[in-house]
Image: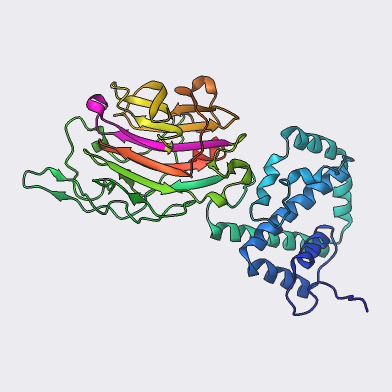
Amino acid sequence: MTDDRIPGADANPLDDAEAFELIDAHLDRHPLTDEQSDALTAWIKADPRHADDAFYRIFLHSYLRLRLQAGLPTSDELSLLPEGAHSGDSDTRWSIAKIRSEEVREVSLAILPAQQEIADDTAATPRWRRRHFVLITCGLVLLAASFYGWRGFGTSLGATGHVLYVEESFDYSATPLTKSATGSLEWPTTGGLQGLNGGGGWSEPWRETDSKVAIIADYTGDEFPWEPKDMRKYGPLGYTDAAGRVLKSSGRQLRTATRPRSVTTRKFDIPKFPQAMRDEAGLGADGAVVWLSFLAQSSLSTADNNRYSYLLIGSKEVAGLRIGKLGAAPSGNWTAVALQTEAEVNLKTSAIPSGEMVFLVTRIIFRPGPEEAVVWINPRLEEEPEVSGAALRLTIPDFRFDGISIRANHSTDFDEIRLGNTFQAVAPTAN
């Protein structure tokens, strides 16, 4: 005896195949009953992964439908998926990024003649049916998007394709400070950022691993014992570009320790990154493009006597990248250097002193063999900057990374650390 049940027509929960059948039927303009709509809503709510699958299904269905309407082949549809993957995999939805830009343009141009036919069909549809279709589609997308929002950073692909995978604004309570009888700061050796777990895209809290700790600096609290040449006393970190656009920022900021040093580290939630950006060794699979940005300002511009304070990705022992104030550049200007087997290589120094507040943006292109890093300092925020306007450009030995380490033996402030797939993702402007 055959089973002629309509998926979702009774109180039994939908399985994945039935849910996809209902989504496809709806997108093909077959009306769903109230019971079917309720069952599909319950299926999406039952598991956060279902929201991922629904969102991907809607995209894939729409994309292939456009190709058919444009008279373009669809036999290469599986090229949207990594080898051996299927649409139910947790990160398969990110494989849509592999669609070639010229292919999307081809579809866009070819579909134009078909748009009038679609518009005519839509106009001929009764108004209540059009409203019902729009409401259900919007409901599906919004329901899926709400689940992405609850799950944190790096789990939704916005309409613009700009994805922020990691963010830290240091929106924590200020670290209590102790002053000596002479008014000098007694830098803390415990506490600091240890155990703080804000931001998004991380797999663990911040960890302090050296003899002193970094602190959370607050300009609204007690006066910090500023030294005469410390320009940080003018106010908290922030950035406004030459056209008056303001970088989005919030919270307080991290301040590294003075001698001997502080080492403050945190790991990323690697499984939340697209499969195309990672491999078994970490982030930085060949072909990946990673954008990193942060605000920074040091207490003094000079880096003589090996004063340093920098952000590190990768490792000194194997390979990686340091960006900040480096002892190898005694001028104290903002600098970047590659690392390879315990050595600094290919050091590049800018013309901007580390005592000046800056917004640093780095793009790393991971290739077979050495990687390419380009660093812009204080770029305009309206669009991705040109490489010709970069402050620093260097080659880095092949490397992978899984987190960030902020290391210093000289007090420097860092804020608004962001990691994303585009310049716009890591350089958002304030509303």
Q: Residue at x 85, y 54 (%)?
A: 122
Q: Is residue 154 visible?
A: no
State whether residue 44 is above or below residue 410. below
Count of picture labels: 0
**Which residue is outermost to the left?**
181
Q: Is residue 291 magenta?
A: yes
State whether residue 72 is above or below residue 35. above
Q: Choose top left, top right, bottom left or bottom right for residue 233.
A: top left
Residue 271 relative to residue 32: left or right: left
State whether residue 33 is above or below residue 27. below
Residues 428 and 100: in front is 100
Residue 42 relative to residue 350: left or right: right
Residue 346 rendering spot, x and y as whole percentages = 43, 21
Residue 101 rendering spot, x and y as whole percentages = 72, 34
Coloration mode: rainbow
Q: Is residue 402 visible?
A: yes
Q: Residue at x 83, y 66 (%)?
A: 31
Q: Residue at x 43, y 55 (%)?
A: 204
Residue 171 rendering spot, x and y as whole percentages = 37, 52
Residue 400 rendering spot, x and y as whole percentages = 51, 38
Q: Quadrant of the N terminus?
A: bottom right
Residue 141 relative to residue 329: left or right: right
Q: Is residue 407 magenta?
A: no
Part of the protein shown in magenta: 289-312
Residues 117 and 387: in front is 387
Residues 205 and 120: in front is 205
Residues 19 and 252: in front is 19
**Which residue is outermost to the right?**
1
